[in-house]
Image (tube, helix red, strand yellow):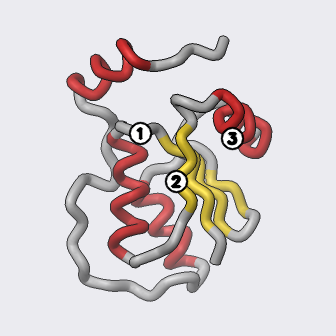
Amino acid sequence: MKIKAYLKPSCGWSNGVRAIMRKYNLEFEDIDIINNRDNYAEMVAKSGQPLSPCVEIDGVMLADVSGEEVENYLLSNDLIKPVDAPVDVPTNAGCSDEEHAKMATKTIRFF
């Protein structure tokens, strides 16, 4: 399975996607959309929208998804089997106020 995840370096939603990848021990390409303008442009072109995270699994783009939604997609399509492994962060939660404040000072604006 080939997985490309278009993620922010620090974000509740992005960390939830990473947690699902760890939970199932899935190899994936973690693509930084904040510090690389070309990565962000690629995500928008492929997903047709500007919101993240976006996760491409074997050519299928899941746009603006949580880790929980990625897990549900993988399970529903028999790409993984259920496991009881715990996750270390919420898989369906946005950024904390602290994360938003940190990103506001470091985020590169492309528009």
Cα distance between the residues tagged 2 and 1: 9 Å
Helix, strand or loop under label 1 = loop
Q: Amino acid at mark 2?
A: Asp
Q: Amino acid at mark 3?
A: Met
Q: Position of residue 52 (x, y in %)?
A: 54, 39
> Tag 2's secondary structure?
strand
The C terminus appears in which quarter of the rendering?
Answer: top right
Q: Is 62 placed above or below 78 here? A: above
In the image, taking residue 58 as reference, residue 71 lies left or right, namely left
- Which residue is identified by label 1? 9
**Rendered location of residue 9, percent (x, y):** 41, 39
Residue visible at 62% across and 58% down in the picture: 4
- Quarter containing the N terminus: bottom right
Query: Which x, y percent locates residue 61?
Result: 69, 55
> Would you call the spot at circle 1 few (<14 residues within 10 Å), some (14-19), or many (20 or more)?
some
Q: Position of residue 8 (x, y in %)?
A: 46, 38
- Which quarter of the figure has residue 46? top right
On residue 30, the disc is: 2
Circle 3 residue: 43
Give the number of the mark in front: 3 or 2: 2
Q: Is residue 2 left or right of residue 70?
A: right
Rendered image: mark on residue 44:
none
Confirm or deny contact between disc 3 and disc 1 (CB under 8 A).
no
Q: Is residue 74 left or right of residue 103?
A: right
